[in-house]
Image (cartoon, helix red, strand yellow):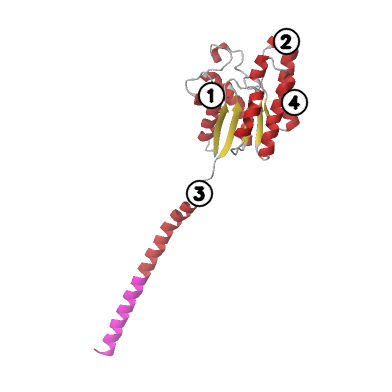
Amino acid sequence: MTDMRRFKTFLALFIWAAALFSCGGDKKEESDQKAGPTQTAAKTPAAKKKIIVFFGNSLTAGYGLDDPSQGFAGLIQKRIDSLGLNYKVVNAGVSGETTSGGNSRIDWLLKQPLDVFVLELGGNDGLRGIPVSETRKNLQEILDKVKTKYPDAKRVLAGMQIPPNMGQKYATEFKDVYADLAKKNGVTLIPFLLEGVGGESKLNQADGIHPTAEGHKILAENVWIRIKDLL
């Protein structure tokens, strides 16, 4: 083989090897690019959802509804999901609950973390004629316990009103408890949870106390306008 032929053969082999190396490098780079995002995504855990606790009585529990998720707490969860917000609603409503019962129960509830706490209690106190001073004391203690356990949690107080069956003085003092406590504790106040529903027969069940599914839609709006900026 002449020197010229050897040179041409060597040059062809060199070009072929260079091309093969280049293709292999491109494939590896392409493979790395494809694998990169997948590997990164696998290493990034899903953001943990924050917790909103609705702590109340039969209104929160959705008493009398075919499906508890039709209650205002469940409707708030649906609104949150529709907006893609990373929050989970915990419905901690117990029918018949008084502020005294809630004050006893709150310690157990606080064993689980929370980020937003909505306190809806007192209606049953008013219906039973429990002294306003007792209602105020229990609500304050519940708010204190939440703050002590979770100082960064946002607290919301749902206001309640009652008919003047127990006398106008009692009804007025009862109503004022919520505004007073909200101001004293620096918490968000829902002035009257049943605004637009209380006293409206078509929006309440036969007992005249518990809202229908349509009534709960209004309650959900009353709540949402007060808590949306906290999320």
Tell me which amino acid carries mark 4.
Answer: Asp
Check disc 3 and report the residue beneath it.
45
Report the mark closest to the observer, 2 or 1.
2
Does 2 appear in magenta?
Answer: yes
Disc 4 versus disc 3: distance between alpha carbons? 43 Å
Q: Check whether the beta carbons of the residues at disc 1 and disc 3 lie within 8 A of each other.
A: no
Q: Viewed as shown, does residue 78 lie left or right of 136?
A: left
Tell me which amino acid carries mark 1.
Answer: Gly
Tell me which amino acid carries mark 2.
Answer: Gly
Q: Check whether the beta carbons of the residues at disc 1 and disc 4 lie within 8 A of each other.
A: no
Q: Residue 230 carries which label?
A: none
Between discs 1 and 3, the one toward the N terminus: 3
For image coordinates 66% across by 35% down, the residue present is 146
Report the mark closest to the observer, 3 or 2.
2
Check disc 1 and report the residue beneath it.
71
Does 144 appear in magenta?
Answer: no
Q: Is mark 4 on a helix, strand or loop?
A: helix
Q: Nearer the viewer, residue 42 or 54?
A: 54
Q: Which mark is residue 167?
A: 2
Q: How packed is label 4: few (under 14 Cα within 10 Å), some, or many (20 or more)? A: few
Q: How packed is label 2: few (under 14 Cα within 10 Å), some, or many (20 or more)? A: few
Whether residue 170 is visible, yes or no, is yes
Q: Nearer the viewer, residue 123 or 44?
A: 123
Q: Quadrant of residue 127?
A: top right
Tell me which amino acid carries mark 3.
Answer: Pro
- Dominant SS type (magenta): helix
Q: What stretch of residues is rendered in magenta? A: 1-21
Between discs 1 and 4, the one toward the N terminus: 1
Q: Is mark 2 on a helix, strand or loop?
A: loop
Q: Quadrant of residue 195?
A: top right
